[in-house]
Amino acid sequence: MRRYGKHTDEDDIRQRPNRKGNRPRTSIRPKHEDAVEGMVLTVDRGRLTCLVDDRVVLAMKARELGRKAAVVGDRVSIVGDLSGEKDTLARIVRIGERSSVLRRTADDDDPFERVVVANADQLAIVTALADPEPRPRLIDRCLVAAYDGGLTPLLVLTKSDLAPPDELLEKYGALGVPYVVTTRDEFVDGVAAERVHEHLKGRTTAFVGHSGVGKTTLVNALVPADRRRTTGVVNAVTGRGRHTTTSALALPLNDPEGGWVIDTPGVRSFGLNHVDPSRVIHAFPDLVPGTEGCPRACGHDEPDCALDAWVAEGHADPARLNSLRRLLATRERREGD
């Protein structure tokens, strides 16, 4: 066997042949300078439906993106066949920086976060006042996820003809969350959609809620040209609805000011394992100055939290501090508690 010393001639070194006959791997990635910008409308089993200009294009994620996944609402760079014709497939080669992210985990013990929607401005939390009964813990969790992800919350209360909204609205009054209250008849004659529509103009709004509350029915009324399968009936035993929306879908709002509506699958739980409690305080700008005297890594629900004295001195409404602590505490409780 031939041995080489310190000073070898490169010509003397044998090259192992490439038996597969393909090019050797390289860490240099193509720049794709000819890529076209698009928006992800929906994702289905590895295939992403994107809007490129005025065309709907089917694409797949490029291998060079690794584990990074694109979600509904993402701005992406696409190459390949962008005609949008049948049986064509393009490639997503870049995912743009996200302005906001709605995330959740399966439960509070799940370490793996799931990005539900990207680049939404607003989160519409749809809940029924009866049939099924409202779940304030789930509403609280959605609010925490909205504040953590940079989305403005909107509360949509349905079926007010079955139960009054006063108690629930009083619970969230200190948060200053805008709201819309509707009845079942208003869903039928389109009044509910008109009221909600006023809050959606020029914005990208993701709709969340557990099954049976009328979320997809409302989306169908807002975007009648792209109707989805309507929600299923509520189970008489469990009091919960049946899932009928299985994937998130972005639909354009028919309005001169523009806007997008993103329907998401009905949720039974909303895990917050990914949320850093220290970020939730930023959704309460009136309380932020009072945290300057807090000890390091203060969770703002501890005995030595400086917010107690600061609020007692009249700098902020005590109801605001109570609301903050209720939202922080919901991360430690299950939705059904």
Image: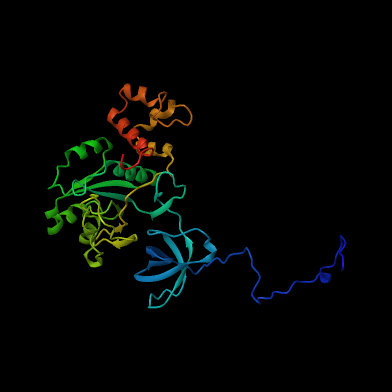
Residue 200, image x and y in percent? 26, 54
Decide: is 95 above or below 59. Answer: above
Nearer to me, 206 or 285: 206
Nearer to me, 287 or 238: 238
How many badges with numbers are in the image? 0
Decide: is 308 above or below 50. Answer: above
Residue 244: tell me if it is visible.
Answer: yes
Residue 87, image x and y in percent? 40, 78
Residue 260, image x and y in percent? 30, 59
- Which residue corresponds to the image point at 35% horizontal and 46% vertical from the top-left? 146
Residue 329, image x and y in percent? 36, 35
Outermost front residue: 237
Judged left or right of residue 113, residue 27 is right
Name the colouring of the figure.
rainbow
Decide: is 98 above or below 1. Answer: above
Judged left or right of residue 32, residue 255 is left
| Image quadrant assignment for residue 225 | bottom left
Residue 317: tell me if it is visible.
Answer: no
